[in-house]
Amino acid sequence: MNAVVLDASFAAELGQRRQRLSEKLGDRVAVVGSAPLAVHHNDVEFPYRQDSDFFYLTGLNEPEAVALLVPQHPEHRFVLFVRPRNPEAERWAGKRLGVEGAKEIYGADAAYPIAELAEKLPLYLEKASQLCYRFGLNEILNETVLRVYRQQVALYARRGTGVQGLLDLRFLLAPLRQHKSPWELERLRQAVEIGAIAHENARRMAKPGVGEWEIEAQLAADFRRLGGQGPAYPSIVAGGANACILHYIDNNCRLQDGDLLLIDAGCSYDYYNSDITRTFPVNGRFRAEQRAIYDIVLRAQQAAIAEVKPGAPYHRPHDAAVRVIVEGLQDLGLLVGDTAALIAGEPPAAAETFKEKEEREKRKPHKPFFMHRTGHFLGLDVHDVGHYREGEAWTALAPGMVVTIEPGIYIAPDIQVAAGQPPVPERWHGIGIRIEDDVLVTDTGCEVLTAAVPKDPQALTD
């Protein structure tokens, strides 16, 4: 199952990651579990995909495994629990790492069969102040960790030392994963390069009468043919009004003359992901209304990218995109009113709760046209880990962070405009446009990793 080669450079990278987390752990112990096998139907399983946190720290792509980081232990600072070798099982499903391989290949200080986790884990918690664990989809591991934790807390009264609380590991690990190392950026660049080629091939293939599913198949073939693991997420190939469905993945319609095609597709390479969206006319010619909306979205994206720089609060690119979109829709007569008031929406109520704030945000006049944020972190997960804000303070962008910048305008045939806004004339209905690039924060500004994928309207037409 190992899709990524554990060569010397990757082994060194993994060791550095574990060391950085260990420094944050101090006298705490981290327990990190592998992803469980997922059943597709009956006894058919999905292709295995490791949990990103587990992979980030171990590089191991096997199920039924647990890693411990025990910084205060005199000898066993990195411990692996894995499936033992089993020739009969391996004949069906492939070679297992085994306890010996966990030490020899993956550098564990100690390794045990996974069946011994409940027995061995308490020994590594005796001098720990906290147990750090992310409760997730593995219910069996969740129960084991909770049972051991309760036992340790009960023993504290007699011993006067040991575990005193649980901490979600994400609070320590996510900030480390936010900042991509040179090794990680190499993988991201490769995922981007493959994604760029696939997008260009898909654009050339798009013609009236071609099935959305045919383009989806071409994308998937290119991702694999060029060395990727496959799609980073289900590809969106949305012709015409289908583009107004944000996560449209049916991909079961034929492209129509005069429609736009929105393709949102990315490649996974060594577990790292690209995320690219382009929108273009199926027949090579924009209608006037399509081009008007496209130009607004492109200007919004350019304004947002200009705000990606070290020290900038995370929300600033989104705010820049919203302003351009609101002003553009005003110019077209699709929004009316004072620009600042349209952006701000209703004034907050006194002692507003978070839920009330969310509901107020949804009522802003531009939301029927642009209802999502302008981007997200990108890395091992497509929507990668990391806090966007702490309380009222937004996270500051920093070198090594990778974000997507993806504004859009969607005018669904059944669009319901905000109170006080004019109805949308029918000639605008069914236009959905999103433009998305992957952007690296650098020491001096930013680098658009996906710049090779055309988005200038002249490059998208005959």
Image (spheres, helix red, strand yellow):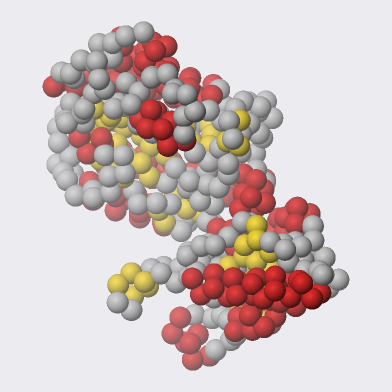
Looking at the image, which residue is at 18% across and 26% down? 429
Can you say which quadrant of the picture contains the C terminus? top left
Q: Residue at x 17, y 39 (%)?
A: 255
Where on the picture, by quarter, is residue 110? bottom right
Q: Is residue 20 above or below residue 92?
A: above
Which percent across, then down, holds residue 177? Answer: 63, 49
Residue at the extreme bottom: 88
Vertical comparison of 202 with 430: above or below:
below
Q: Nearer the viewer, residue 306 or 195?
A: 306
Q: Which residue is located at x 44 percent, y 72 percent?
A: 37
Residue 263 position in % (x across, y down)? 32, 40
Quadrant in the picture for residue 365: top left
Q: Nearer the viewer, residue 418 or 183?
A: 418
Left or right: 198 as drawn, with respect to 110: left
Up-down relation of residue 407 to residue 149 (above or below) = above
Residue 404 visible somewhere in the drawing: yes
Furthest residue toward right = 74
Residue 198: percent from left, percent from top: 38, 45
The x, y position of residue 300, in whole percent, is 42, 21
The one nearer the camera, 438 or 343, is: 343
Pick whichever, 356 or 415, lies toward us.
356
Q: Is residue 178 left or right of residue 202?
A: right
Mark count:
0
Q: As drawn, is 305 to the left or to the right of 423?
A: right
- Residue placed at 39% from the left, 22% from the top? 298
Q: Is residue 236 above or below residue 68?
A: above
